[in-house]
Image (cartoon, rainbow, N blue to C red):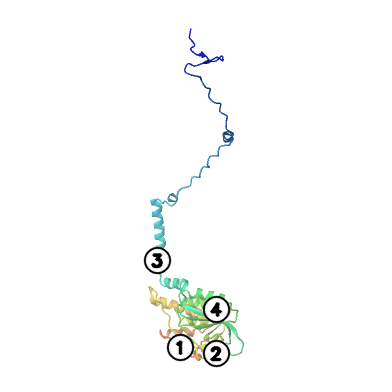
Amino acid sequence: MSVDDRQDDGTGHRSSPTGPRVAPPRQTPSPFAARAEARPSPPPPPRQANVASPTRIFRFSLPSIIIFVLLLSSVAIQAYRDLSRPGAWDFWRETYIAASMTSAVISDVDLDGSGHGRRALAISGKIGSASASWFRDRLSEARLAPGDAVLLSSPGGALNQAAIMGEVIRTHGLVTAVATADAAGKLRPAACASACVLVYAGGLTRYGVAGSRLGVHRFTTSAPVGDPLAEAQRIQGMVLGYMTKMGVSSAIVEAMSQTSDIRWLSQKEALALNLITKPVDQP
């Protein structure tokens, strides 16, 4: 039997011998705590996409670098070979840097003194490796109509380019004259020699302006060839076929072959060769 050592305090309650026991205070829950518990927890942050770092994007493997270098080298070698061909550098320079010829559009030129003006494109300078393409562009910009004129002042140049320019003139139904003109359309004598004569021959009507000069000579090539004689014959045949097509006498080839220097034709000679088809007494 255990002995209860608690003592009665007179109220019917027993107290501990060490002193009265005090019940812990009852805690009232805070309304703020309840609100905090009721508040939903924030959603977890969204997961970021698996994006590669910049250093990983631009990371190249050694084989890919080698392939890139080989491709770049092949392009450079091909470009060098293209520019090493005769005339290739001149063609590139004239196309992308500076043309060898200049042009001007004159709105009213009276070629024959009749008082009837026409639109004209005056071109001057050396006929270069890309002059035919340049000439087409200038014609397009000038908007010449059939019967309008191309005025020439040139020492010559590339034979094949000159032939193409003459063909373009004939296709457009234009006339030609060896002359320059001021802004008012006043003509001045000029010279057209060597390959320029082929451009002049392209005109449907070829005006002979008084004081202007037409010069011819034997054509040669500066490119290395295996048989120079055969190449000379080929060039002569090409010039003969072109001039005959344009209505010029075949005798002009004989006049060209007589000298390697410029031979200036008199107006009488040019008329006899049908190179000039309409003489003009006054410039």
Q: CA distance from mark 3 to mark 2?
A: 49 Å
Q: Is residue 81 left or right of residue 276?
A: left
Which image quarter holds the C terminus? bottom right
Q: CA distance from mark 2 to mark 1?
A: 16 Å
> Given the image, on which type of amino acid does mark 3 rest?
Tyr
Q: First in sequence, mark 3 or 4: give its number.
A: 3
Q: First in sequence, mark 2 or 1: give its number.
A: 1
Which numbered mark, 3 or 4, is in the foreground of this view? 3
The residue that disc 3 covers is 80
The residue that disc 2 covers is 279
Q: First in sequence, mark 1 or 4: give its number.
A: 4
Q: Residue at x 44, y 72 (%)?
A: 93
Q: Give the residue at the far top of this rendering.
A: 1
Q: CA distance from mark 3 to mark 1?
A: 41 Å
> Judging from the image, what secondary structure is the residue with disc 4 in?
helix
Q: First in sequence, mark 3 or 2: give its number.
A: 3
Q: Is residue 224 left or right of residue 101?
A: left
> Judging from the image, what secondary structure is the residue with disc 2 in?
strand
> Given the image, on which type of amino acid does mark 4 rest?
Ile
Q: Give the residue at the far front of this rendering.
A: 10
Q: CA distance from mark 2 to mark 4?
A: 19 Å
Q: First in sequence, mark 3 or 1: give its number.
A: 3
> Given the image, on which type of amino acid does mark 2 rest?
Pro
Q: Position of residue 145 (x, y in %)?
A: 60, 79
Q: CA distance from mark 1 to mark 4?
A: 23 Å
The residue that disc 1 covers is 264
